[in-house]
Image (spheres, helix red, strand yellow):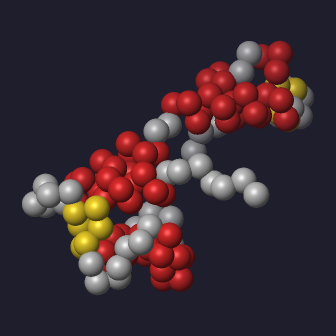
Amino acid sequence: MPTYVTIQAKFFPPTQINDKKGELDFSSFLTMMHRQMQQEDPKTEILEALRMTDRQKKGFIPASELRAKLTMMGEKLTDREVDELFKEANVKSNGKVNYEEFTKMVTLPPVDY
């Protein structure tokens, strides 16, 4: 886990952090989050993870295998959450998942109502 000093050195000039209290103002927090999000590419990360699962390199993985990974690894989803995700992505639970299309769907920006 990064220390306070590590975070301070990585993201902020000393003038943006209240050293006495170790507090961060909201504007600085937003700046830090924006920088971090620019460095991340979730679409590429998801696609690469799914490609590694595709042993035959055909662009598809079994829905059952994707379900197992989503419910057993990392930040585990519930079966209900996977059902909802599959429904949104038009994935049949007994079918194959085109992981490039699936990745596009799950990385779309959320709908703003």
For the residue pair 59 and 80, the one nearer the viewer reads as: 59
Residue drawn at (66%, 55%), measured in percent from left and top?
111
**What is the tally of numbered marks visible in this picture?**
0
Res 76 seen here: no
Q: Is residue 94 above or below residue 101?
A: below
Q: Where is residue 32 in the image (x, y as percent from the top left)?
A: 69, 30
Residue drawn at (22%, 63%), measured in percent from left and top?
60
Q: Is residue 10 above or below residue 75?
A: above
Q: Position of residue 65 (x, y in %)?
A: 28, 74
Q: Where is residue 16 in the image (x, y as percent from the top left)?
A: 82, 21
User: In which quadrant is the C terminus drawn?
Assistant: bottom right
Residue drawn at (83%, 16%), measured in percent from left and top?
15
Q: Position of residue 41 (x, y in %)?
A: 46, 39
Would you say 47 lies left or right of 81 here? left
User: In which quadrant is the N terminus drawn?
Assistant: top right
- Splitting the image into 4 quarters, where does residue 23 fall? top right
- Splitting the image into 4 quarters, where does residue 11 fall? top right
Would you say 34 lies left or right of 84 here? right
Would you say 70 lies left or right of 99 here? right
Residue drawn at (78%, 16%), measured in percent from left and top?
14
Residue at the farthest left position: 56
Res 105 seen here: yes
- Splitting the image into 4 quarters, where does residue 5 fall? top right
For the residue pair 22 and 74, the one nearer the viewer reads as: 74
For the residue pair 71 and 22, the one nearer the viewer reads as: 71
Would you say 8 lies left or right of 51 here? right
